[in-house]
Amino acid sequence: MNAIEQYIAPTSLAQALECLREGEVTVLAGGTDVMPQSQSGRLKFKPTLMNIQRVPELKGIARDGDAIRIGALVTVTDIMRDTLVQEFFPVLVEAGDHFASDQIRNAATLGGNINNASPAGDMLIPLLVLDAYAELAAKPNGEMRVRRIPLGDFFVGPGKTRRAANELLTGVLIPLPPPNHFARFFKFGTRPALDISAISIGIAGVRTDHLLSQVRVAFGAVAPTPVRAPRTEAALEGKRLDRATIDAAAQAAYDEVRPIDDVRASAWYRRELIRNMTKRMLDHVAQA
Ligand SMILES: Cc1cc2nc3c(=O)[nH]c(=O)nc-3n(C[C@H](O)[C@H](O)[C@H](O)COP(=O)(O)OP(=O)(O)OC[C@H]3O[C@@H](n4cnc5c(N)ncnc54)[C@H](O)[C@@H]3O)c2cc1C
């Protein structure tokens, strides 16, 4: 473990951003990635450790115009219990239900899950199919600057994002869904609980008179980042959700993913899972 020279716990976003501007900082939220990763040697602490738990601007879930804003410090448990989330984005509750254990969910924040940028991060797949935006703030020259980027553009590799070193993720914005919107999440691990995904799938869209539109499909743990699946989306967009469409989309998903072999599953098994589970999820949507 590296030596931490300074520990700070800012009480405002402005203070936190000043700290990020001034030096090399490790951000600590719930610590459920930071602590195990520092103990295993995967994460080397920077000279300053900044605990952001007391920054009020990073908390809460609220309506923000035509979107819902979820603060970076909101935990998986908070998400699952929130009435706005339950009403507009039940797929996030579904994903929370597959996330670790109660103890981890109580500490694990949404901002931590996003910034850890694991290809298997469970909240990332539903957020991708919900067209979420990442909100980032910095204070490069004394003035607060906030930018929003589509979450699909945020991830660049395992553990790597487009967040600049002087920026903090302040939250995510999720556009309110249109009428007749559906969104589903599926995760497969080698154990029923407390497991990292071998694969995960998110599917969302609008279904009117049995025709699909605004289709979004995303896969986890099949590439260096969580990914959208444009060929699978094209196989569904504008189509009637019948047997032929479902089979074509499941085959497109199989053809489109290029997973790797690792300790959790072989590439062959992952592709089979993607095909079979895409089919099963679409069957469920068709029957709903
Ligand atoms: C036993 C166990 C089981 C787990 N199971 C799952 C699971 O089922 N699914 C899953 O997806 N994950 C799982 N995880 C991983 C972890 O719990 C999640 O990724 C969690 O959401 C991380 O949030 P945190 O608040 O603990 O982040 P931290 O550990 O505090 O931080 C994670 C990373 O994000 C950075 N960071 C945090 N907040 C911000 C911010 N606002 N702005 C900029 N950078 C920030 C930190 O510097 C660090 O790099 C598990 C972990 C453990 C230990």
Image (spheres, helix red, strand yellow):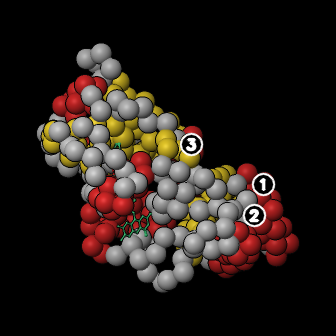
Three-letter code, disc 3: Val
Front residue of this view, candidates 204 and 165: 165
- Please provide percent x and percent y for residue 69: 37, 46
Q: Which residue, given by chain and number where applicable, does mark 2 sit on?
A: 253
The reply to whether the residue tagged 1 has its Cβ within 8 angstroms of ligand 1 is no
**The image quadrant in which ligand 1 is located:** bottom left
> In the rendered image, which quarter contains the C terminus?
bottom right
Give SS at disc 3. Answer: strand
Residue 131 in view: no
Give SS at disc 1. Answer: helix
Q: Which of marks 3 and 2 is in front?
A: 3
The answer for how far apart the CA atoms under marks 3 and 1 are is 20 Å
Residue at 54% of width from left, 77% of height from top?
189
**Left or right side of 159 for 18:** left
Quadrant of residue 97 in the image?
bottom left
Residue at 26% of width from left, 63% of height from top?
107
Q: Which mark is residue 231?
A: 1
- Please provide percent x and percent y for residue 265: 63, 74
Front residue of this view, candidates 195 and 266: 266
Indicate whether 139 appears above or below 65: above
Indicate whether 92 appears above or below 110: below
Q: Residue 156 carries which label?
A: 3
Tags 1 and 2 touching, CB below 8 Å: yes
